[in-house]
Image (spheres, rainbow, N blue to C red):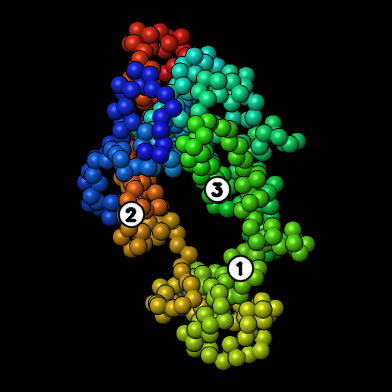
């Protein structure tokens, strides 16, 4: 394999079965046909690209946990280190909450395929160093400098494990005037301009409905970790990776940033419309909204043909996209009056097979009842130690040869503490009991 372990102690070598801890049960709920009906027991095997890679996950909330979940889906063993008796703050981000475990359903979204251990990192430094010694990757999202106080900063732990990939996720990076500030998605999205360009034209700034800057940061981090692991295969050296929310948000500005940097054009809010393409937005229908986009002149001609307004593309005001952008209001008002006369479903039937893009604005219920989402089995049902089962949106990426899957439900707080300390580090039951009595572990 191109990804190799840095170091095996006799205990670690004897306990490689831990890396295949994942399992799941059959889905017997025939009433939930938006969930995969034939869920089989799944373990990490040689088809998982990251089999044999151990990740120490010190992250909380969204960006970091999302990063490590993506890596766990690919077969990495992810050990989620949480604060005793408190855990990841996202466990409390509700309602809604799971009935028996009490965890927020928010927590479920980014923490499958992981093992939870509870360690007080301030007093459990020796344990942490032993885990670091046995890990390939450490991911953390503390305010820069915080872990240095506990001998867990990169410059300190690189001597414990010279081949460790150490990924720091922060609000603003390790340098610059904002480096010591805590970072949250909505603040980075505010400062990074995303809220400024999101919302209705005459309305106030709006945030995206999910933590898109957090998610994008997690995806950047996951890609960076994979690249560092690949480079380590050549150099036999670890390294530090810095990923931050604000830089990620700026990178998400894509054409908006380019327009300003190269043409001095200040952006504004467009609602669902597009600044450079017309028509390309949502329109009200009898029973909802329909999003229609004509990305070329030929597509616009076809749209008009299907709407029985064949003469419109011949009008000099609408012949080219440049013309349509210039005369946006007139054209959008014309289309809006027509599309408001029928239901979204009927319009979708009329537009079936069209070259232009079109789709209804679905509610979340409609998303998961959609025939396509059901057909591809995107939603997975996983057994849960306290709540029988939970549902998650599975990985969106499918490989022809590799495996990438949801195998185990997000763990209970400290569910694997004893198992990891015993099987991975060789701690005996009396030592584990002593650490628990001291409040160092849970």
Q: Which mark is residue 3?
A: none
Q: Callout 2 environment at 10 Å: few (<14), some (14 to 19), or many (20+)?
A: few
Q: Residue furthest front?
A: 234
Residue 59 location, x and y as percent? 52, 32
- State the separation of the CA atoms marked 3 and 2: 25 Å
Assess whether mark 1 and mark 2 are in contact (beta carbons under 8 angstroms). no
Q: Which mark is residue 273?
A: 1
Q: Earlier in the sequence, mark 2 or mark 1?
A: 1
Q: Which residue is mark 3?
A: 216
Q: Give the residue displayed 50% in from the left and 23% down from the top.
A: 161
Which element is circle 3 on? helix
Q: Is residue 231 visible?
A: yes
Q: Which residue is mark 2?
A: 400
The image quadrant that residue 42 belongs to is top left
Q: Give the residue displayed 71% in from the left and 35% down from the top.
A: 175
Residue 405 location, x and y as percent? 34, 45
- State the separation of the CA atoms marked 2 and 1: 37 Å
Q: Give the residue displayed 56% in from the left and 92% down from the top.
A: 311
Q: Callout 3 environment at 10 Å: few (<14), some (14 to 19), or many (20+)?
A: some
Q: Nearer the viewer, mark 3 or mark 1?
A: 3
């Amino acid at each position: 394999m191109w990804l190799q372990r840095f170091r095996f102690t006799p205990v670690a070598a004897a306990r490689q079965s831990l890396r295949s801890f994942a399992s799941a049960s059959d889905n017997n709920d025939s009433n939930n046909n938006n969930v995969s009906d034939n869920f089989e027991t799944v373990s990490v095997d040689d088809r998982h690209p990251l089999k044999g890679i151990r990740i120490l996950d010190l992250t909380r909330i969204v960006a970091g946990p999302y990063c490590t979940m993506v890596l766990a889906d690919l077969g990495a063993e992810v050990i989620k280190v949480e604060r005793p008796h408190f855990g990841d703050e996202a466990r409390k981000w509700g309602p809604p909450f799971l009935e028996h475990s009490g965890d927020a359903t928010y927590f479920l979204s980014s923490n499958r395929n992981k093992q939870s251990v509870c360690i007080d990192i301030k007093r459990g430094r020796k344990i942490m160093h032993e885990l670091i010694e046995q890990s390939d990757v450490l991911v953390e999202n503390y305010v820069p400098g915080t872990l240095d106080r506990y001998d867990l900063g990169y410059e300190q732990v690189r001597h414990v494990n010279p081949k460790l990939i150490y990924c720091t996720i922060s609000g603003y990076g390790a340098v610059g005037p904002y480096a010591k500030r805590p970072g949250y998605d909505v603040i980075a999205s505010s400062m990074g301009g995303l809220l400024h360009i999101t919302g209705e034209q005459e309305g106030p700034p709006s945030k995206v409905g999910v933590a898109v800057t957090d998610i994008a940061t997690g995806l950047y981090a996951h890609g960076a970790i994979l690249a560092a692991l690949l480079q380590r295969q050549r150099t036999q050296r670890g390294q530090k990776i810095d990923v931050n929310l604000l830089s990620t948000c700026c990178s998400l500005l894509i054409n908006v940033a380019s327009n300003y940097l190269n043409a001095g054009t200040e952006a504004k809010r467009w609602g669902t419309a597009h600044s450079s393409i017309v028509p390309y937005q949502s329109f009200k229908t009898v029973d909802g909204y329909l999003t229609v986009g004509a990305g070329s002149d030929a597509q616009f001609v076809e749209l008009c043909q299907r709407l029985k307004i064949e003469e419109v593309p011949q009008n000099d005001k609408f012949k080219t996209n440049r013309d349509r952008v210039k005369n946006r209001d007139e054209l959008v008002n014309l289309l809006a009056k027509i599309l408001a006369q029928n239901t979204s479903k009927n319009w979708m039937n009329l537009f079936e097979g069209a070259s232009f893009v079109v789709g209804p604005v679905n509610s979340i219920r409609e998303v998961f009842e959609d025939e396509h989402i059901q057909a591809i089995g995107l939603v997975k049902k996983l057994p849960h130690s306290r709540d029988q089962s939970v549902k998650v949106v599975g990985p969106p990426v499918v490989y022809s040869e590799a495996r990438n899957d949801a195998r185990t439900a997000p763990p209970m707080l400290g569910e694997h503490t004893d198992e990891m300390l015993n099987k991975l580090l060789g701690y005996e039951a009396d030592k584990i009991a002593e650490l628990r009595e001291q409040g160092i572990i849970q």
